[in-house]
Image (cartoon, helix red, strand yellow):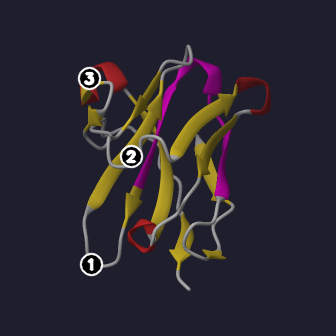
Amino acid sequence: EGQLVESGGELVRPGGSLKLSCVASGFTFSDVDMSWVRRAPGKGLEWIAGIRSGGLVYVDTSVKGRFTISRDNAKNTLYLEMQNLKTEDTAVYSCATSRLIHDCYSRSYCRIPSDPAAIWGQGTQVTVSS
């Protein structure tokens, strides 16, 4: 059974940086597209970045230039590097398997993973506050 475990979330000041990790197990990570999504307090799920199995990157315009998604297939790990964090970035960040061809309208606009068989992590809390 596939599993995703996120880590790296913490309290950070505005303007600070964080790097989140998502470790995969139980499936062939290198064959699968992946996404990061987040849920801010009182709001719905928001897709923010995705990466194809071959490495092609998709990033939402709201975080482009500040967030970088990457993957290390040898380590079965997905990353999200976040810079210049803002208070509105406060959210629970989760990783999920994806089908970006099906879920994306462009390289900067995708919906949250729609595959009912998608694997989701439980999330890691990022709080941006002074």
Q: Mark 3 — residue? A: 102
Alpha carbons under labels 3 and 1: distance apart: 28 Å
Q: Which residues are magenta?
A: 18-37
Query: Can the viewer see residue 28 in this picture?
Result: no
Horizontal side of 73 relative to 122 (left or right) equals right
The amino acid on which the numbered mark 2 sits, given as a three-letter code, is: Ile
Q: Is residue 85 magenta?
A: no
Residue furthest out toward the top: 54
Which x, y percent locates residue 44? Answer: 25, 64
The local secondary structure at tag 2 comes to: strand
Find residue 51 and report its horizontal and vertical position in percent.
49, 28
Residue 107: x, y in percent?
33, 25
Question: Rounded to the nearest whole Å, what is the CA distance between mark 3 and mark 2?
Answer: 16 Å
Neighbour tally class for label 3: few under 14, some 14-19, many 20 plus, Cα within 10 Å? few
| Snapshot quadrant of residue 102 | top left
User: Which residue matches tag 2?
Assistant: 48
Q: Is residue 29 left or right of residue 73?
A: left
Horizontal arrangement in the rendering, residue 109 relative to residue 28 (left or right):
left
Q: CA distance from mark 1 to mark 2?
A: 17 Å
Quadrant assignment for the C terminus: bottom right
Query: Residue 50 location, x and y as percent?
Result: 44, 34
**What kind of secondary structure does the magenta stretch mostly adopt?**
strand
CB under 8 Å between callouts 3 and 1? no
Query: Mark 3 belongs to which amino acid?
Result: His
| CA neighbours of label 2 inside 10 A, class few (<14), some (14 to 19), many (20+) | many
